[in-house]
Amino acid sequence: MTDVAPSPLKLSVIGCGYLGAVHAAAMAQLGHTVVGLDVDAERIAALSKAQAPFHEPGFGALLEENVGAGRLTFTNSYDDLADVDVHFLALGTPQRDDGLAADLSYIHSALDSLTPHLQARHGKPTLVVGKSTVPVGSARALRERLEEIEGVHLVWNPEFLREGFAVEDTLRPDRLVYGVGHPVQDAEAVTVLDAVYASLIALDIPRKVYNYESAELVKVSANSFLATKISFINAISELCDITGADVNDVAEAIGMDDRIGRKFLRAGIGFGGGCLPKDLRGLISRAGELGAIDSFAFLRDIDAINTGRREYTLRLATRLLGGSVDGRRIAVLGAAFKPDTDDVRDSPALDIALRLFAEGARITITDPEALDNVRKRYPSVRTAATVEDALADAELVLLLTEWGEYKALDPTAIASQVSAPRIIDGRNVLDLGAWRDAGWEAIALGRP
Ligand code: UGA
């Protein structure tokens, strides 16, 4: 794939995590010259050698192609960001330790380092473009920090990429949203950002220019809405367990109403990752600060329903093992917060495994990509590189991340590998009838 923009620009991407590293490589793919900056020296060393520091389909190839072509470089030093047209801020905004709000300290410290390098460029504008997810009102406050420097504009351009589809989502987004501080003063900035995304705009990808506040709210509203869909269907799934209804059938039929849609109605152990949980909590917190707390009380329930799924699954496992998991051998299939990523941040799968471990279960976790991250964080937890090793002698199997290879497991073939054929399908992806026919005691969340 070689998409070349009509007029390549010089870009920087500050922060090379999932978002920044993929954005940097994708912008180079569009034909721009890109320098990625991160304070993590190990990460920069790997990226400079075109080695992907995380698992993301298609990212390794993109990195290799663009580092190889000389369009994409990486650095630790702001001195290397001279004469850049557009600086993208792609720093993490995790949940703060002391509450629900987002922590903007990485953005502030990046701006502390960047601003001394921003000078007037002989009439050429310089853009600082925020991609990070921030609480509504942040961009306008950050703009004040840049106002002193002639020719510098701040645009907020939220990112909607999903892990596992990050490359595709960056090169073919559903929409581009630009938040500007002032429609007239920032008109030139819009033109420059249009030049960055020229090849995407040429594909008729909708591009919307809003004020900062709308652009910021688009992002957190989207993630909170997705979280709400998931918790809604998970609440329904509890009723299914009580009444004998099948949540997959309910989701299928309500999803046929295109006002509702089928996506994000997969019931199971709930949502996790670095985005949905913290953006939901960030919105609750910001709404409280802005005096709208009562209208956002429901989002606390969305969060509580979600985390409640973990306890629910634990209780199910306990019941299936006759009242206690202490000393029992449990195979856990999946640690990543979803398939096609090695990310274990706020992973419901890993959280359930750790809760079982804390109750004395002898767990063995397997995952096609995330085991290194599990071992780094929880060295005392037993891991197995293959499903076969994880299953050996298990009295209960938990399928907690719906990797393709787990969905494709042959219940007959693996029945003899475990000591008791019992499985909980935490993601509602297995054909329970086929597993039961093969002799398994198979249960799912919200299915009879
Ligand atoms: C999410 C959003 O989907 C992206 O649009 C957004 O850009 C990104 O956050 C971000 O803010 O950067 P991501 O965190 O990669 O993307 O993951 P999702 O695909 O949204 O999945 C989140 C969680 O919800 C996963 O744990 C997944 O297993 C769970 N999920 C998803 C369900 O339990 N049921 C579903 O029906 C769908």
Image (tube, rainbow, N blue to C red):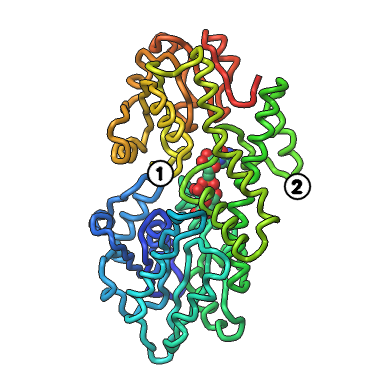
Q: What residue type is labelled 2?
A: Arg
Q: Is residue 5 visible?
A: yes
Can you tell which quarter of the image residue 362 is in?
top left
Please determine whether, in this image, residue 395 is positioned above or below residue 363. Answer: above
Task: Specify whether tag 1 is near ligand 1 (CB below 8 Å).
Answer: yes
Can you tell which quarter of the image residue 344 is in?
top left
Can you tell which quarter of the image residue 433 is in?
top right
Dot 1 and dot 2 residues touching (CB under 8 Å): no
Please determine whether, in this image, residue 414 is positioned above or below residue 293. Answer: above
> Which residue position holds label 1?
343
Residue located at (38% from left, 12% from top)? 417
Q: Which amino acid does label 1 sit on?
A: Asp
Secondary structure found at label 2:
loop
Q: In this view, does 336 lie to the left or right of 176?
A: left
Front in this rendered view, residue 40 or 123: 40
Task: Give residue 58's position: percent from left, percent from top.
Answer: 40, 48
* N-terminal label among 1 and 2: 2
Task: Specify whether tag 2 is near ligand 1 (CB below 8 Å).
Answer: no
Task: Give residue 29's position: percent from left, percent from top.
Answer: 40, 61
Q: In this view, does 373 lie to the left or right of 154?
A: left
Front in this rendered view, residue 145 or 406: 145
Residue located at (52% from left, 8% from top)? 439
Please determine whether, in this image, residue 282 is positioned above or below residue 323. Answer: below
> Mark 1 Cα within 10 Å, few/some/many (few <14, many 20+)?
many
Q: Is residue 248 visible?
A: no
> Which residue position holds label 2?
259
